[in-house]
Image (spheres, rainbow, N blue to C red):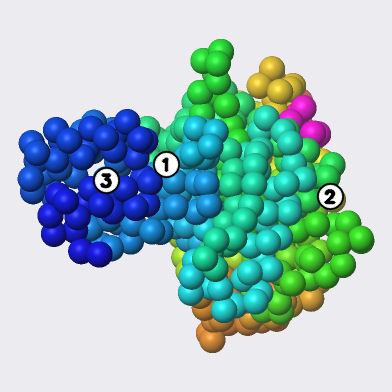
Amino acid sequence: MAVDSSVALVEILHRHRLLEPAQLAELSGSLRARFPQPRLLAGELIRLGWLTPYQVNQLFQGRGGELLLESYLLLERLGEGGMGQVFKARNRNLGRLVALKVIRKDRLTDAGAVRRFQREVRAAAQLNHPNVVHAYDSGEADDRHFYVMEYVEGIDLSQLVKRIGPLPVEQACDCIRQAALGLQHAFENGLVHRDIKPHNLMLTRAADGRGHVKILDLGLALTNRPDEGDLSGTMTREGVVMGTVDYIAPEQARNAHTADTRADLYSLGCTLYFLLAGKPPFSSGTATEKLLKHQLEWPTPIRKLRPEVTEPVAALISKALAKRPEQRYQTPAEMAVALTSALRGASVALPAARPAAPATPPAPVRAGTQALEDTSANWSSIVDSSEAADSGASFRRRAMRKRRTLLSWLMAGLVLLLLIVLAALLLRG
């Protein structure tokens, strides 16, 4: 129905029960008379806080019926991705504000996408922790799959850094400590998040005024429990990267199915680096180049970018970003304790100085719809060139040692010669 008059707008609001009974009564009386033009009336409803700009736009596009999903009234769109849209909504029965995630209509024909969405609901339902967003409900209405979770009023860490720049060291470390506590709860429930990044960490304001971090988006969560059947297997395909290339662990890029909680800790280390530096560890290059850097390179030391970062915190980041999982922290709780200790100045054991190259070259990879195949290079040639560089470096080190030994003998000879000449002069005198 077209909204071509105030009468039509009032009729639509009545039909879909988008306002409270008292509001509808006032709307049908004095308000409609004062604002005969539908857009002027809609503007007044926005000013009164009865409707949101998003709702008004939907109404004038003839989509008023899409604002209701069972007992949930959509208020505004919070975000959108390849899988679905997230809305701020209100449960009309309870009056509670929630975040409601709806699978995109164009993904409903993709059985794998629907399974992934359902898996996110089940994964979220397992968790109940202050540092993880709570799941409340799920459902299906008019072929629209959705699930309902806690609405968090705040800002994600990616937007926070964009707004104010790199965070103070203590605040950055505390945010990551809280995220580690949430990941520990997921770990204890057999879950690996697989997409930890600043965008998925929401900072809100706690009752005591402190910043409170909550982990969002379990869309890529993988279960390690054997009784889950092929639940996690549905998310792993050869040649496909599950995760975000700026924050992905080396082993997760090679095989997301075998990655464990230590991959999340690598991503958490990358996130801490971002909070302190204002950019991820490997911020330049194509997606393929970034993946290779995660496998083979070390980022610029954080203290070169932020000299005020203490040695213990810098060492903690180095350990979190170790290429081999066994060289990192082994549980999120261990990393949380290390963060507390690092802020107090305690030392952190460092991993081996140099990363090992992948044992076997992985298949060409891509992230989402962005191709990551690089026709100018392949994994085997990159690994081979790395090994050749190692051999060259070893040869140069041996040559340097020989030169230093020769110079030492020459210096000793010169000193002995000078002593002999001096002695001869003294005897002659």
> Is residue 427 at least partly visible in the picture?
yes
Does any portion of residue 253 appear in the rendered image? no
Q: What element carries label 3?
A: helix
Quarter of the picture containing the C terminus is top right
Nearer to us in this view, 240 or 70: 70
The N terminus lies in which quarter of the figure?
bottom left
**Of pointers 3 and 2, the one earlier in the residue sequence:** 3
Camera-nearest residue between 25 and 77: 25
Seen from the viewer's position, the closer of residues 202 and 264 is 202
The residue at the point 66 percent across, 33 percent down is: 131
Q: Say what secondary structure mark 1 lies in.
A: helix
Residue 103 vs residue 234: left or right? left
Residue 335 inside the magenta-drawn segment? yes
What residue did someone put label 3 on?
Answer: 53
What residue is at 19 percent from the left and 58 percent from the top?
3
The amino acid marked with disc number 3 is: Pro
Query: What residue is pinned by disc 2?
Result: 190
Question: Label 3 to label 2, Cα distance in Å?
Answer: 41 Å
Residues marked 3 and 2 touching at CB (< 8 Å): no
Residue 361, percent from left and from top: 74, 77
Q: In which quarter of the image is residue 43?
A: top left
Q: Mark 1 points at which residue?
A: 159
Q: Residues within 10 Å of mark 2 (few under 14, many from 20)?
A: some
Q: Position of residue 344 (x, y in %)?
A: 69, 17
Region of the chain picked out in magenta, as a range:
332-338
Q: Disc 1 marks which amino acid?
A: Gln
Q: Nearer the viewer, mark 2 or mark 1?
A: 2
Is there a contact, CB below 8 Å, between mark 1 and mark 3?
A: no
* Above or below: residue 70 compared with residue 134: below
- Residue at image position (19%, 55%) is 8
- Report the disc number at residue 92: none
